[in-house]
Image: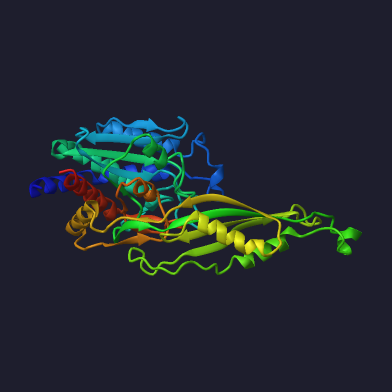
Amino acid sequence: MDKNIKLKIIEEIEKSKKEQIEFLQKLVQTSSVNPNMSDPTKSSPYDPIELEVAELIFNKLKEIGLSPKYEGISSSRPNVVCEFGKKEKEKKTLIFNGHMDTVPPVREWDFGPFFGAIQNGKLYGSGVLDMKSALCCYIFMAKTLLKFEKELNGKICLQFVIDEEPMAASHFGTRYLLEKGYVGDAAIIGEPGTYKITIGNRGGHRFKIEVFGESVHTGSREWEQKKEGLNAVLEMDKVINALQNLKFPAKEYPVFPGRKNVLTFPTIINGGKAINIVPDSCIAFGDTRILPGITKEFMEKEIRKRIDKLGVKYKLTPIVYVPAVFIKPTESIVEILKNNTKQILKREPITEGSGPWSDMWMFIDKGIPAINFGCDGKGMHSKNEYVEIQSVIDATKIYALTALDFLK
């Protein structure tokens, strides 16, 4: 690739720096908090959680000369999709994907979580690192590359998706777009961090267990004499103890150095209806992080095997299963992104898998090489979340040069 063209691209991105940071502030100031973190099953495609952010992005894309589209189950909660470049079938397509929803802000912020405050080269705000900064990078990458569109020997597909935060397995966001035919030859998901190119993620198995007892008034003679009543919370205690230290097949994967299979139970627990009534039901949720080879059938079998020995009346309900996935570190998208990161940041990122999963797995599961790579900052899912302003500009440059090289 002509070095002069790359230098011109870098210069163009620098020219838009002020506009880019001001737009990122607008994204932060526009709330898209997902309220379904504690129970992803309550998520609805008709709840306009990200709608204002989607409209802000849609209008900005039109302003810079693109033709975005809304794609979703309902107009109340759409994804935003935008394609440009050479769209012939034989040409390659590179996808840039990111979620518009954010987690609810925690307490004790030094700045208002929706102010978009700037201090000491950092932009603060709820969701600014995870991952409105990356969404902003995509837009201003596109603004620059439109001026060099003839150099793109393929197509770029920008995807701004909904409903990722609760469990990165929604049917309304990335998966919906994949099923609609928005596929490509590689995908970049702007999850935070430039120190690492994430080439895979552990999977997960989430489940709900309900344990049943027998309710009775705590002041009754029957309860006093142990003739009636069974405390479901105490029955759940048996289940909790039985599921600790569950054994997994011992196998290590170089892509996930030092990572293990981990079952955490319970993560949420609720039981009882009144202070003077013996609980007849107790519900608890569990979360398992799994390496390749661990299936949902294995998980459910092991859980049932341990509980069945207790003589407890229960119901096991699977919530979601996500397979562990990874790609080769030699994939072209990895090598190209690594080279451009070295050019812009003067250091080489490591390549390995991550502990948590993201929408990345959906692409890899469909045979599309995908990676996570985003901006630098701190405080993700915590107080005083911020992104480093220089990292936003650097990531935009890296994305643009990577798209240019991948589609050459």
Q: Residue at x 26, y 45 (%)?
A: 18
Residue 249 at least partly seen:
yes
Residues 301 and 30: in front is 301
Residues 137 and 336: in front is 336
Q: Residue furthest right?
A: 221
User: Coloring scheme of the render?
Assistant: rainbow
**Image: 143 above or below 372:** above
Q: Is residue 179 left or right of residue 211?
A: left
Number of callouts in the render? 0
Residues 49 and 205: in front is 205
Looking at the picture, how far across and down is residue 98, in whole percent?
Answer: 36, 45
Residue 110 at least partly seen:
no
- Quarter of the picture containing the C terminus is top left
Quadrant in the rendering for residue 246: bottom right
Looking at the picture, how far across and down is residue 302, in whole percent?
Answer: 56, 61
Q: Is residue 278 left or right of residue 378?
A: right
Q: Is residue 302 left or right of residue 335?
A: right
Looking at the picture, how far across and down is residue 159, in whole percent?
Answer: 34, 40
Looking at the picture, how far across and down is residue 373, in whole percent?
Answer: 31, 54
Q: Is residue 31 left or right of residue 344?
A: right
